[in-house]
Image (cartoon, rainbow, N blue to C red):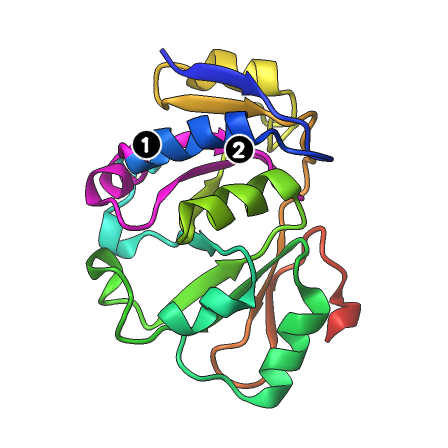
Amino acid sequence: MAQFIKIYPENPSEKEIAKVIRVLRDGGLIIYPTDTVYGLGCDITNTKALERIAKIKGVKLEKANFSFVCHDLSNLSDYVKQIDTSTFKILKRALPGPYTFILPGNNNLPKEFKKKTTVGIRVPDNNIALEIVRQLGNPIVSTSIHDDDEVIEYTTDPELIFEKWQNLVDLVIDGGYGDNEASTIIDLSQGEPVVVREGKGSLDIL
């Protein structure tokens, strides 16, 4: 059964974040808050953990469209081909924030994603998520958790999330109520921005 820990977004406890990092380094799966909906995540460098997430989502790992959650834009060059100035300006305006940007992937993508030509990058405006990736030292792979309820697409109550996911993941963070609107997805891989999904992030940044 998963651990259930409370972390306050205003001032995330070092001790609690350290517990999360241990779980991630051991190949565990976490559910954590972002600036949009709660996410399911694991260490980007752990193959077994990546396979577990793909299995839960019912997709083949090499075909999965997971986001890479980064602490800031300094991680970009690890996985993304060099981008032009106008693309970088959009990213600077929008991040951290409720956006997923699709960018051209480079040759350093983890081996599980080698066949992908693009990568979805997230820098959420949430101290808990940012502190986790900062202390882990590399991005986490993430996907939104959906609800079976037809009316509400995303569960926002951490206790209900824990109830439902406690046997599938290793740790659930209660970071307060989540949002029920997903991130805005913008494809910047072809030069001109293409809005894939309009979500919480305003399109004014374009």
Counting other residues with Cα less than 10 Å from the Cα at mark 1, is it few (<14), some (14-19), or many (20 or more)? few
**Quarter of the picture holding the N terminus:** top left
Question: Where is residue 50 shown, x and y percent of the image?
Answer: 28, 43
Q: Secondary structure at mark 2?
A: strand
Residue at x-position 43% and y-position 15%:
3
Q: Secondary structure at mark 1?
A: helix
> Image height check: is 42 above or below 166?
below
Instruction: Report the amino acid beneath label 1.
Output: Ile
Counting other residues with Cα less than 10 Å from the Cα at mark 2, is it few (<14), some (14-19), or many (20 or more)? many
- Earlier-in-chain disc, 2 versus 1: 2
CB-based contact (under 8 Å), mark 2 and mark 1: no
Q: Which residue is disc 2 drawn over?
A: 32
In-front residue for pair 113/16: 16
Instruction: Report the amino acid beneath label 2.
Output: Tyr
Question: Where is residue 131 shown, x and y percent of the image?
Answer: 56, 43
- Residue 104 got which mark? none
Question: Where is residue 75 shown, x and y percent of the image?
Answer: 46, 65
Q: Which residue is disc 1 drawn over?
A: 56
As drawn, is 203 to the left or to the right of 111?
Answer: right
In-front residue for pair 51/5: 5
The magenta stretch spans residue 52: yes
Q: Answer whether residue 148 is visible to the viewer in this image.
A: no
Question: Where is residue 44 shown, x and y percent of the image?
Answer: 33, 50
**Quarter of the picture holding the C terminus:** bottom right
